[in-house]
Amino acid sequence: MEPFKRALLRFLRPKTIWIVLLTIAAAVSLVFIFTTTWYETPAAYIVYVFSAYAMVVLAFRVPKLVKEAKELIHSNQHSRRYVTDTPFRTMISLYFSLAVNLVFAIFKLVTAIIYGSFWFGAVGVYYIILCVVRVFLLRHLRSGDYDLQQELRAFRNCGIFLFVLNITLTGVAYQMVHQGMGYEYPGTMIYAVASYAFYCLTMSIINTAKYRKLDAPLLSASKAINLATALVAIFTLQTAMFAAFGADMDERMKFIMNTATGSAVCLIIFVMGVLMVVRANRKLKSIKAENK
């Protein structure tokens, strides 16, 4: 029985080089089968079995790969800090988002000036406000002063920023719904954009709930801004989907759906801002009452 077990383990857990070759071969075989007329031949079933074996082998190796990846991350002080230090990770995320938003804002505003486009101008202002909010949060995170009252005031101010952001977003939504403005993506790029948008929305919802439970106002504010941005991305994605696949769709139905989604996004962001301001005021009043 012992030799059989060893043979089975070698069969299911070959060396890394063989796993790489098996995965590549399975992927290439599947692409070949699905892009030719061979998908109804006996060869197709052989490829399916081979691909299933490659997937099983890869699945057996995943836990070890995850363990090795964790060890590699923790072996470096910078990557270890990124994984274990939540405020530091949030700050890096804010820097990255700030850089992306700044590039978009400059591009849209320059384009608005060149073409005299109110649409590009409104989108540019939207990204400028996002930049201002993120700079505001970074200033507090970089100070390293995590006094609860100060964090709550910053949290409240971010809620107020959401009101301002919502005003700009309403203008953008109006142009999308009533003037047919929006985004268009070439070829299959829209699928990548859609995947990324839904990923951002899912992670934003999870992180917003998680950091709210941690009672860390600055971190919660950062995640609330990310959630607002993800919601806007879903709305713009819808208009892009209509542009790409809605040629045969009734224009009135497009109008109704864009109006409903745009209104829902604006309302959710407005409510988020209200809840942030109310929550911060209540906690600040509670702290003042305790200190008397």
Image: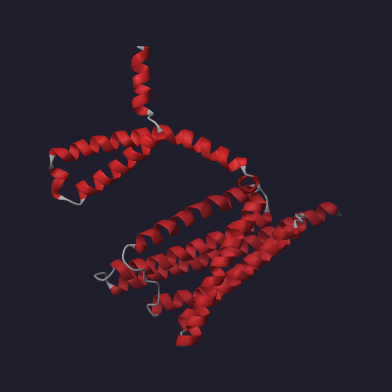
Question: Is residue 152 in view from this perspective?
Answer: no
Residue farthest to the top, as pictured: 1
Residue depicted at x 44% and y 59%: 197
Q: Position of residue 246 (x, y in %)?
A: 29, 68
User: In front here: 215 or 79?
Assistant: 79
To which quarter of the image does residue 98 belong? bottom right
Q: Position of residue 25 (x, y in %)?
A: 29, 42
Residue depicted at x 37% and y 30%: 14
Point out the image quarter for the N terminus: top left
Residue farthest to the right, as pictured: 292
Q: Number of labelled discs?
A: 0
Residue depicted at x 45% and y 86%: 115
Residue depicted at x 34% and y 20%: 7
Q: Position of residue 164 (x, y in %)?
A: 60, 73
Q: Give the side of residue 17 with respect to residue 277, left or right.
A: left
User: In front here: 162 or 237?
Assistant: 237
